[in-house]
Image (spheres, rainbow, N blue to C red):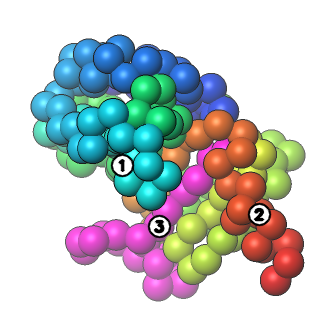
Amino acid sequence: MDIVLDPPHGITGFPTGMPASEVKAAAAELGRVEVQDEGSDLRFRPMMVTVLHQQFEIVFTLKDGKTLRTSEVWIPRPGPEEISVRFRGIDVFRTPALRLVDQLRGLGLDVMRSDATTWIVPRLSLGLWREAGHEVPLDTDGEPLYFQAALAGPTETYDRTLARLQEG
């Protein structure tokens, strides 16, 4: 299975703006689905649809409880299926994190470090996290060798983070 991150347009099979009913149906084709805060339009408690596959998780956040806003893919675990998550042909979870950042910059993208474990590509709205809740191989900087999660969202997803980084 190949999952392509295509911010700001979404990910394979889940375009930004997709109706909630279609998100749930398509997610169910990938694995078990959990829905949290069904129909919620609250900013800090949005509706979330999580697909739980034996080798990966994807968390979909729905704006106003009706349409897909962001898709967050977690690093695939080993198993029977060959799973890759790619952005512009680069394997996001099999390329060491710092090398991936260099490759993204080589594509002419403005990649910024938001905090110790978070990297963003503002305006394109790609987010990458190195934080892990379990033991993983570490890089020379003491952080996980590979990114652990990636988010694709609409263009304004990281506007506040960008403003904060530019001020500070």
Distance from the alpha carbon under mark 2 to that under mark 1:
23 Å
Dividing the picture into quadrants, the one containing residue 49 is top left
Of helix, strand and loop, which one carries label 3? loop
Q: Amino acid at mark 1?
A: Trp
Q: Earlier in the sequence, mark 2 or mark 1?
A: 1
Mark 1 Cα shell of 10 Å, populated few (<14), some (14-19), many (≥20): many
- Whether residues under marks 2 and 1 lie with C-beta atoms below 8 angstroms apart, the answer is no
The answer to whether residue 150 is left or right of residue 21 is right
Q: Is residue 118 magenta?
A: no
Q: How many numbered circles are shown?
A: 3
- Measured as percent of width and height from the top left, residue 64 is found at 47, 36
Distance from the alpha carbon under mark 3 to that under mark 2:
19 Å
Can residue 56 be seen from the camera position used here? no
Can residue 9 be seen from the camera position used here? yes
Q: Residue at 35% of width from left, 14% of height from top?
A: 22
Of tags 3 and 2, which is closer to the observer? 2
- Measured as percent of width and height from the top left, residue 10 is found at 55, 29
What residue is disc 2 on? Answer: 162
Mark 2 Cα shell of 10 Å, populated few (<14), some (14-19), many (≥20): some
**Camera-side residue: 37 or 51?**
37
The answer to whether residue 100 is left or right of residue 74 is right
Q: Is residue 30 above or below residue 39?
A: above
Q: Is residue 62 above or below residue 43?
A: above
